Every structure is written in C-alpha cells, then in structure tokens.
Amino acid sequence: GQQLNQSPQSMFIQEGEDVSMNCTSSSIFNTWLWYKQDPGEGPVLLIALYKAGELTSNGRLTAQFGITRKDSFLNISASIPSDVGIYFCAGRPVGGADGLTFGKGTHLIIQP
Amino acid sequence: DTGVSQDPRHKITKRGQNVTFRCDPISEHNRLYWYRQTLGQGPEFLTYFQNEAQLEKSRLLSDRFSAERPKGSFSTLEIQRTEQGDSAMYLCASSLQDLGPQHFGDGTRLSIL
C-alpha cells in the first residue's frame, strides 16, 4: 500500500527554536494534512492543504503542499513547551481510498 | 464544542471474547472513518461510511471485524474472537464532506489478555 516517509523521527530542541519536519511519498497526493497527538488522545488537526503549492499558516505553524504533490512540510516557529508531542503528516493519494494514509510521526521533545 | 466521541475509552478483555466500540461523530458530519493505531505507528485506515453506507474496507479489516452505521449517525465496530494482535488504539474520525478534513476522537484503547 501507500507509504509516507516522515522525517525526522524525533527532534530534541531548545525552547524558542524553530522546528521543521517533512513528509514525502512515492505517489501523487491530492490532500495533505498535519496532526498533533498527545499521549492517550486522538490526533488533533493542525493544518489542511488541498492545492499544490499552497502555503497555509495557523499561528506559529506553517505548512506547504509541495508543487510536485509528493511532499509537504510543517514548520513551527519559536517553540514553546506545549508544542511537545507527536506530529503526523497524512494524505490522500490520487485515485486512492478516501481514508487517510499516515506517516510514522515526528516526536518533538523540547528541552527547557 | 461536541467533537467526535468514542466509548469506552479503555477495554480490557480476554483472548477469544467479542468486543464492541461506539463512535458518535460530529453532528451533521456524513462521513465516518475507523482507524487502528499501534504503538509507535501512525493510524491505519480500516473502513469508512457515507451516511449509512459502508463504502470502503481496507485489507486490514479481517472477517472478524464488522462495522455498522445503521441510521447514518453513530457507528459501532465489533471484533469477534479477539486475538493478541488486536491490541491497539481504535480511532474514529468524521468529516463534513468528500475530501474534507477529518476530525478524530480520543479513541478506544483495547488490551487483550
């Protein structure tokens, strides 16, 4: 089945630093979404992208739908302690199922 | 704010028993999805409904799994004759329209003894 390669697997950063993570696929996607998941909870939607080249911000978060339609990135500026968690990219491949395909997640750890 | 609601939050059962989970989607969302998530992995798609019609099932959904959405509102996911490998978090999501963003509940964590 479809697979998304999400990197990095984990990040150890200092509070206040900027963060960047990305997701790539071997096939073309028509939707990219970014979620954050805290322990024991479900994923929470951060940003949804629907057009190639689209750049969308949500507060300190910015995500882009790659122009090749095979990748997306998420940036977090000026990280704060509550940014800790696991970030997942997810998407729908063109011609694929309506269900989302998820990456394996990026575990963000912030050192005070 | 009534988001996606799942019940129970935790279920512990012995191998071989049947279990049923319930999902209440966001009101007026006509699409409802079930996913399974194991430790250290992202959620994996199982099946989805548009209103009461089950439109797609992934290959992960074995014959022991069945899902229903009888009135196009809440949905149930039943696992028969549970196995150790069924231990996972079962997540439900809903969306308002085709290709719309999916909003997740907090899941039901299933542990098989």
Image: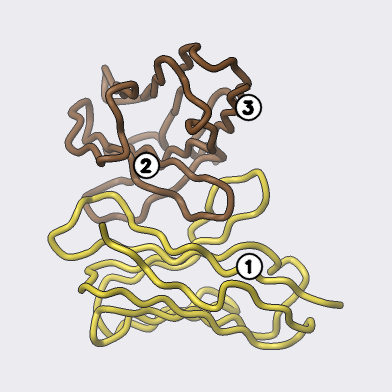
According to the image, label 2 marks what residue? B94
How many numbered marks have been drawn onto this rendered protein structure? Answer: 3
For image coordinates 33% across by 80% down, the residue present is A71
Do discs 1 and 3 share a chain? no
Q: How is the image coloured?
A: by chain
Quarter of the view holding residue A85: bottom right
Residue that lies at the very extreme toward the top in this rendered image: B17
Percent position of residue B54, x then y: 20, 30
Q: Kindly tell me whether residue B29 is visible in this rendering.
A: no
Front residue of A37 and A59: A37
- Are there few (<14), some (14-19), or many (20+) residues within 10 Å of tag 1? many
Percent position of residue A44, x then y: 53, 55
Answer above or below: position of B2 versus B40: above
- Chain holding disc 3: B
Front residue of A106 and A46: A106
Answer above or below: position of A18 versus B72: below
Answer above or below: position of A12 versus A96: below
Percent position of residue A29, x then y: 24, 70
Q: Amino acid at mark 3?
A: His
Q: Which callout, 3 or 2, points to the residue nearer the camera?
A: 3
Q: Amino acid at mark 2?
A: Ser
Question: Which chain is tinted yellow?
Answer: A
For image coordinates 73% across by 71% down, the residue present is A109
Front residue of A90 and A52: A90
Mark 2 secondary-structure assignment: strand
Left or right: B104 in relation to A10? left
According to the image, label 1 marks what residue? A107
